Image (spheres, helix red, strand yellow):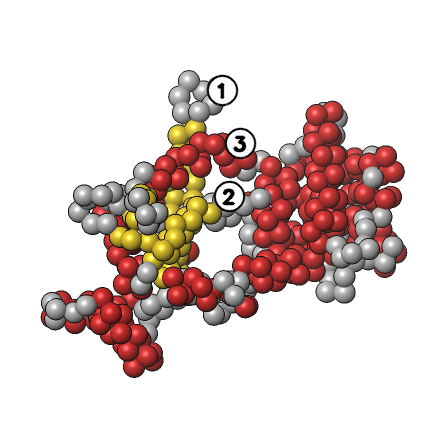
């Protein structure tokens, strides 16, 4: 005899939080959640305990309040327009009284919670990003990371008595004159917060361009020579590249390969002739040009460069261990010629326009709509 077990649907809890499900398995960012769903202080306590902070621990509570202060400062200095302020009842700890209140107020249905609910959600979104950035490896080991990543480049960049910059030392097997060499300073806290808020797919450990270097050459040919030099002299380790982060909108590799073959066949070509050949080739065969473009919603399509992300194995000094703590850390390398660099510095391609587009998107995500801040 077969016994069939029948479960009646009326006995099953069907109260699903579909926003939560979209976050878990739908690919949505937690920053995009319109509200939390916490009903009591006990639920807030358990929520924060899973998040990593114990409200019964004074040091953890103090840390949450520090995130609150930084979030309010960031919103007021980076996202709000002239004359706009975070209302004091949400922005001042003495008026909020209990950090758990922010979570409870952010959990009220927007229709009944009104501006208070939206302001608390906005503050918590920024607090969340600050928390992740604060606990990133770079924050703890920034000196070791910067020294070990930048030192190999600083050792091979030289300047002659006329102030001309070179990649490679005098008397070496190959020395490439540069128009510029820039060390990209690590992203400031505000810059990193804005990037994480503006890009729903980003989290702190996936910020791959916190620091980096940029080579500006006198010609496109020299851009490829720089790439070769860095590999030949083991300044970078190609096994540590992150392949899906590479970008080349400067000159197509397939056409460059054909150019090199033609140059080899004609050993008497001058640099000017090579430059003209490369320009002619890319114009005549633009339909065959094979670029590598990783789309960035905030980067102008007119911005041209070669870029890759490579990791370096860092050995960080720490008193907690009797040996160095070892971990990989990524950084960005950009290469472009001088003409392209100058074009990238103006108009929609400029860095200031890029940052402005990021901030507009960050503001929309923090406040949950394009309409701006909640009515106070």
Q: Disc 3 versus disc 2: distance between alpha carbons?
A: 14 Å
Name the residue tied to disc 1: 320
The numbered mark, 2 or 1, whose residue comes first in the sequence reads 2
Q: Is residue 3 left or right of residue 237?
A: right
Give the percent coordinates (x, y) of residue 151: 36, 37
Of the numbered discs in the image, which one, if any, rests on residue 129?
Answer: none
Q: Which residue is drawn at the image coordinates 81% and 51% (left, top)? A: 85
Q: For the residues labelled 2 and 1, say whether their Cβ atoms are less than 8 Å apart.
A: no
Q: Is residue 239 visible to us here?
A: no
Name the residue tied to disc 3: 140
Of the numbered discs in the image, which one, if any, rests on residue 186?
Answer: 2
| Residue sitting nearer the eye, 77 or 110 | 77
| Residue sitting nearer the eye, 229 or 33 | 229
Q: Which residue is drawn at the image coordinates 43% and 28% (left, top)? A: 316
Q: Is residue 362 visible to us here?
A: yes
Closer to viewer: mark 2 or mark 1? 2
Could you tell me which secondary element the residue under label 1 belongs to? Answer: loop
Q: Disc 3 versus disc 1: distance between alpha carbons?
A: 13 Å
The numbered mark, 3 or 1, whose residue comes first in the sequence reads 3
Could you tell me which secondary element the residue under label 2 belongs to? Answer: loop
Height in image: 281 above or below 122? Answer: below
Q: For the residues labelled 3 and 1, say whether their Cβ atoms are less than 8 Å apart.
A: no
Q: Is residue 261 left or right of residue 88?
A: left
Give the percent coordinates (x, y) of residue 35: 75, 52
Q: Which residue is drawn at the image coordinates 85% and 48% (left, top)? A: 87
Height in image: 307 above or below 142? Answer: below
Could you tell me which secondary element the residue under label 3 belongs to? Answer: helix
| Residue sitting nearer the eye, 143 or 136 | 143
Give the percent coordinates (x, y) of residue 69: 74, 38
Height in image: 317 above or below 354? Answer: above
The numbered mark, 3 or 2, whose residue comes first in the sequence reads 3
């Amino acid at each position: 005899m077969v016994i069939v077990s029948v479960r009646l649907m009326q006995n099953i809890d069907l109260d699903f939080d579909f926003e939560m499900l979209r976050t878990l398995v739908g690919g949505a960012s937690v920053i995009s959640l319109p509200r939390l769903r916490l009903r009591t202080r006990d639920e807030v306590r358990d929520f924060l305990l899973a998040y990593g902070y114990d409200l019964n621990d004074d040091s953890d509570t103090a840390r949450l309040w520090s995130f609150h202060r930084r979030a309010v400062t960031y919103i007021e200095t980076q996202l709000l327009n002239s004359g706009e302020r975070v209302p004091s009842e949400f922005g001042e700890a003495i008026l909020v009284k209990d950090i758990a209140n922010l979570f409870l107020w952010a959990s009220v249905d927007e229709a009944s919670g009104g501006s208070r609910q939206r302001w608390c959600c906005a503050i918590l979104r920024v607090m969340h990003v600050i928390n992740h950035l604060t606990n990133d490896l770079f924050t703890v080991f920034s000196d070791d990371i910067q020294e070990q990543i930048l030192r190999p480049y600083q050792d091979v960049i030289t300047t002659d008595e006329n102030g001309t910059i070179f990649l490679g030392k005098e008397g070496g097997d190959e020395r490439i004159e540069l128009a510029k060499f820039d060390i990209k300073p690590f992203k400031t806290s505000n810059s990193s917060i804005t990037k994480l808020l503006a890009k729903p797919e980003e989290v702190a450990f996936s910020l791959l361009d916190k620091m980096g270097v940029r080579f500006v050459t006198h010609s496109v040919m020299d851009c490829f020579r720089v790439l070769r030099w860095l590999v030949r002299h083991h300044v970078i380790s190609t096994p540590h590249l992150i392949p899906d982060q590479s970008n080349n909108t400067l000159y197509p590799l397939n056409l460059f390969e054909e150019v090199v073959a033609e140059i080899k066949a004609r050993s008497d070509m001058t640099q000017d002739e090579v430059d003209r050949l490369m320009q002619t080739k890319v114009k005549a065969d633009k339909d065959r040009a094979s670029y590598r473009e990783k789309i960035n919603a905030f980067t102008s399509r007119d911005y041209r460069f070669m870029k890759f992300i490579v990791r370096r194995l860092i050995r960080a000094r720490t008193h907690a261990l009797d040996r160095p703590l070892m971990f990989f850390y990524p950084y960005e390398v950009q290469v472009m010629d001088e003409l392209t660099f100058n074009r990238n510095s103006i108009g929609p391609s400029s860095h200031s326009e890029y940052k402005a587009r990021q901030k507009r998107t960050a503001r929309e995500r923090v406040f949950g709509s394009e309409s701006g801040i909640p009515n106070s």
